[in-house]
Image (cartoon, helix red, strand yellow):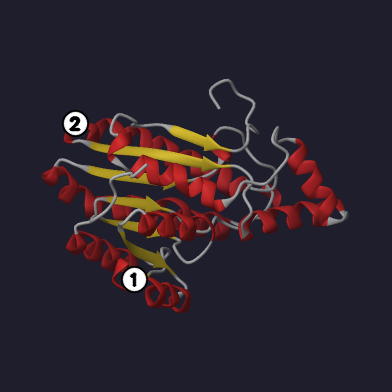
Amino acid sequence: MELGLAGSAYAVGGASSGLGRAIAERIIAEGGKVVGLARSRDTLQELADQYGERFISFPTDFTDPAAVSRAGDELVRRGVAGCVFNAGGPPLGQVDELTMEDWDSAYYSTLRWKVQLIQAVLPMMRERKSGKLLFLESVSIKQPIDNLVLSNAFRAGVAGFVKTLSREAGPQGITVNIIAPGYHDTERIGSVLQKAADLKHVDRRQIEDEFLSEVPLHVLGQPEDFAGVAAFLLSPFARYINGQTITIDGGMVRYTTG
């Protein structure tokens, strides 16, 4: 099934690794182009060397407002059809472990840059009367995760922003959605597992077994499968999906709206 991404350009945050890289590679496989945004200049260049003109490297530190401003200008110049908002999550920790500086930093790394980038690309999409805005967040939006209070708090804020924006931008043919991953086979989940193991003073494998016992499928998700859902939501086939938070978690979230 061809998704209709060929010939269009899409911005992908965190394109150098994990879920972001899987999405970037799926877009390219569908015939689209990717503007890859991430801090890892070397890895982005490797992808540019591998995929040629189909991958445009644009190193960006999302915690730096000036860098985000430059990225916004580049995305407008490229006329991107859609944006995937994705970056590494804030530090792990419990409420009494974290400083106010940690909270301030988490605001910049998890929420602020997304609002700033939206403000850059939204006028272009409104004028064109089309656009796909897709946010990669976490199942913590629906079911908070232990030892991730910063993520739990700020991703909930992103969800409120996305729902509001979906109603404001929808009349111009712009869709705004969230995909919320559960436990996927990435470096990030490795950090979460290790943090939990350290707190309990047990082997990481034991913690992994405990985590997977919450997932009816009893396996970690694969980035390639996640990328397929993202590509669909960026496609014309998803034109009537708007303002949604779609969990991809193997059935972990227990709510009937999960």
Quadrant housing residue 212? top right
Residue 247 % position (x, y):
53, 35
Front residue of 93/193: it is 193
Left or right of 3? Residue 189 is: right
Give left or right: position of 161 versus 137: left
Residue drawn at the location 41% of the way across and 63% of the way down: 62
Image coordinates of residue 165 in percent, x first then y, are 30, 37
Q: Mark 1 points at which residue?
A: 58
| Picture coordinates of residue 235, whole percent (x, y) | 31, 42
Query: What residue sits 52% from the left and 64% below the top?
Result: 17
Q: Residue furthest front?
A: 1
The first of marks 2 and 1 along the sequence is: 1
Horizontal side of residue 139 vs 94, given as left or right: left
Q: In this view, does 180 lie above or below 85?
A: above
The secondary structure type at the circle numbered 2 is helix
Quickly name the residue at label 2: 171
Q: Report crowding for label 1: few under 14, some 14 to 19, many 20 or more residues within 10 A (C-alpha).
A: many
The image quarter in which residue 175 lies:
top left
Depth check: 233 or 100 in front?
Answer: 233
Whole-percent x and y of residue 241? 34, 31
